[in-house]
Amino acid sequence: MYGVYGKLLIVDLSKMDIIEKELEQEVFYEFLGGRGLGAYLLAKMLAPGEDPLSPNNVIVFATGPATDSGLAPASGYGIFTKSPVTGLFTEAYAKGYLPSLIKRTGYDAIVITGAASHPSFITISELGVNFYDAVETWGMDTDTAEGSILNVVGATDSEVLVIGPAGENMIASACLKSNRHRSFGRAGLGAVFGSKNLKGVVFRGGAKAELYESEAFTGWNDQFIRRCNNEEEAKAIKFFSIPSLVTVANTRGFFTSGYWAEGRLEGWEKIVESYRSGKVSAKGLSCHSCLLSCDQETFINYDHCGRGVKGLDYNYLSAIGGLCRITSLEDIVSLVDLCEQLGIDPVSAGNIASFAIEAGLRGKLDNPPLYGNSDRIALFLESVAYRKGEGVIFADGIREAAAMLDMPDLAVHFRGLEPAGFDPRVIKIVALSHLVSGFGESNPESFYLSGLGYGLFDTEKRNNPARIFVEYEDKMNIIDSLVFCRNAHKLIQWENLIAVVFLLTGKRYSAAGLRAVSARNLSTIRLFNLSEVTTGMGDSLPSRFIEEPINNEKDLVKVEELELMLKDYYLLRGWNEKGIPPAGNNNQQLLRRTIQCL
């Protein structure tokens, strides 16, 4: 095989044992790697109906043929599991230097199952797996835990992925942390780690996958790098900064303000001015082998803040700033930093905190957080992370909190997952992406932001927006399976994907062949999800998006336009009117299981 190893590693935490298995070449030809491989393994290895927080749930790490190849925007990997928030498929993608080390372990995918009898962490390399006691590390914040674990293993050529106190306490919004600034993993990935008593995973290795045409690939990559240095699209990725995005969102009216109450944040200009006045220093950060520097390190030049945050993005600003009505950038940065140390996803944190504020305004809580008050919000988030006081109500997510507080109509979520900050009442295609996404949303950071350049935000003015979305989604499926960086999608066309897949793997696809891979990946995820529910997927919006207009009551999602988009999407995908895909080579068992459930 080329571009991959054809090897799978299974780590059983309960038995402290490992199993190595071969992966057939046909699996890679049909799913490529990354998202496709992760979905395939999750569907194959996890029985329907398993409790996401039980030892039987699995965590799948999957790289792709492009990972660690030296390709400029291809430093990425995916993590896949069954979500404790939605009860469905969930995924997360991370960039940086960790993906190359995961690939260098010599495995295309690593599956973690079982649960350790006590707090533990593990190291994985091409030499094997080592199990360590993490009792002393348990309870540490993410930064401290990273340093402590790396000090124990004594390896300078390693990276570690950890959880914080929120993950240990199996909070629904618990996420993962790596490279001391990359927080990722929505829908409770950190809680799954916590349920397995797994504080962290260290990766290191020296394996290298052989490429089919390494010399030709090097030449192709050199040309791609020159394009990155010269093309306007690449320059836009570097310089289309957070202040610009905040300005666009508030000007167009799709920024979040209050708990999904308005499309513009009063005082948003203060956030933009903080960047432009010199109060904030921001510099670009590049992932391994990438020249785009699209990530940022943001540091507030105030003594009281104490530190900055890396990777501050629009979604964090809209959730912590917009939803909680905070216009002080230093306060936003402080709260994002708190979330990262606790191991809470900042997008979910902003949603939960603003919902709690609304509950307090309705007399449902005794000591609620307050809009604009970062200190009260910080105390509230800590109470959630540690399951203390009224934070217990929100520890299992918005859906459960809304039920406990008798506020289900106010809650905004998709199958239990809180959305990111692009209001579908203004950007209608966002509503479709939430409904058909495998886990409640369609990778908001990459999809929506790159959509500014792709034209997806103007699809209300075009014919058949579902067709435009399907085109975009097919391309992203291949990018997520190789694994590329989604932020570079405008630089990568179908002909580029065809060429690079051949140079990496030796498999020559047509554009239709790659679209078939995308369709197979999507069908696998859809059938997995359908097999986990008994009443269908619930392809509908939160009532507020349909009943409560914003921006002077002119923006609202009409039920008929949503139904039309969904109908068109199912038709274009070849699914039936209930959204059930047809049987294929690798999903007949899933289809049978789905039909039985329905």
Image (spheres, grey):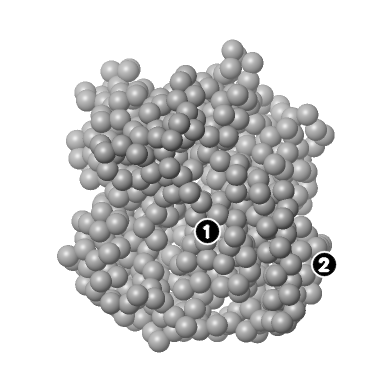
The quarter of the displayed image where residue 152 is located: bottom left
Q: Residue furthest bottom?
A: 127
In the figure, 595 relative to 316: above or below?
A: below
In three-dimensional space, the C-alpha distance between marks 1 and 2, rounded to whole angstroms, equals: 32 Å
- In this rendering, would 143 be left or right of 81? left
Give the residue drawn at x 82%, y 67%: 510
Residue type (three-letter) at the residue carrying disc 1: Ser
User: Which mark is on residue 571?
Assistant: none
- In this rendering, would 99 be left or right of 330? right
User: Which mark is on residue 286?
Assistant: 1
Q: Residue 285, position in %: x, y?
A: 49, 55
Q: Residue 148, position in %: x, y?
A: 24, 66
Can residue 475 be seen here? The reply is no
* Disc on the earlier residue, 1 or 2: 1
Residue type (three-letter) at the residue carrying disc 2: Ser
Q: Residue 517, position in %: x, y?
A: 71, 64
Q: Quadrant of the N terminus?
A: bottom right
